[in-house]
Amino acid sequence: MTVPGGPYRLSVATQTYVHRVDEVGQKAPELLVGHLYTRDLGDLSSRHVLRGLISRVCGLSDDTGTMFYRVKRVPAYWEAWTVY
């Protein structure tokens, strides 16, 4: 599987996931709305945990490879989060 910015070796589980999401996206993209919403909430709510885990496991000492998980404290986001 070719990944932009690669070359990377993706696990079999990741390749299976990517192929399935692509397949559903081609046949019935509306089915991905709930999935993506859930993934987004999970990513937002646990980014700090994931960022730390990735840094520790991969031995990263800076933001290389973890910038996606860095979230600035945007007031409107944090207000909404406390209500959620």
Image: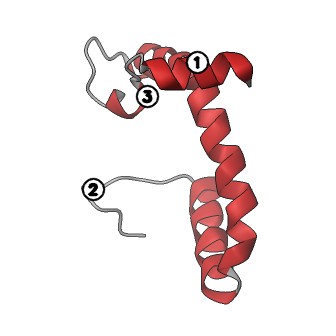
- Per the model, the C-alpha gap separating discs 2 and 3 is 19 Å
Q: Position of residue 68 (x, y in %)?
A: 38, 34
Q: Nearer the viewer, mark 2 or mark 3?
A: 3
Q: Is the Cβ of the residue at disc 1 closer than 8 Å to that at disc 3?
A: no
Question: Which residue is pictured at 42% across the width and 16% down the height?
Answer: 73
Q: Identify the amino acid type marked 2.
A: Gly
Q: Nearer the viewer, residue 77 or 3?
A: 77
Q: Identify the mark nearer the N-term, 1 or 2.
A: 2
Question: Which residue is pictured at 58% across the width and 18% down the height?
Answer: 79
- Per the model, the C-alpha gap separating discs 1 and 2 is 38 Å
Question: Which residue is pictured at 70% across the width and 75% down the height?
Answer: 30
User: Mark 1 packing: few (<14 Cα in 10 Å), some, or many (20+)?
Assistant: few
Q: Identify the mark nearer the N-term, 1 or 3.
A: 3
Name the residue carrying label 2: 6
Name the residue carrying label 1: 79
Q: Identify the mark nearer the N-term, 2 or 3.
A: 2
Q: Secondary structure at mark 2?
A: loop
Q: Identify the amino acid type marked 1.
A: Glu
| Residue 34 drawn above or below residue 50 | below
With 30 as the anchor, is 44 left or right in this view? left
What colour scheme was applied to this rendering of the protein?
A: secondary structure
Q: Secondary structure at mark 3?
A: helix
Q: Which mark is residue 69?
A: 3
With 49 as the anchor, is 66 left or right in this view? left
User: Mark 3 packing: few (<14 Cα in 10 Å), some, or many (20+)?
Assistant: some
Q: Identify the amino acid type marked 3.
A: Tyr
Q: Is the Cβ of the residue at disc 1 closer than 8 Å to that at disc 2?
A: no
Q: Position of residue 20 (x, y in %)?
A: 67, 71
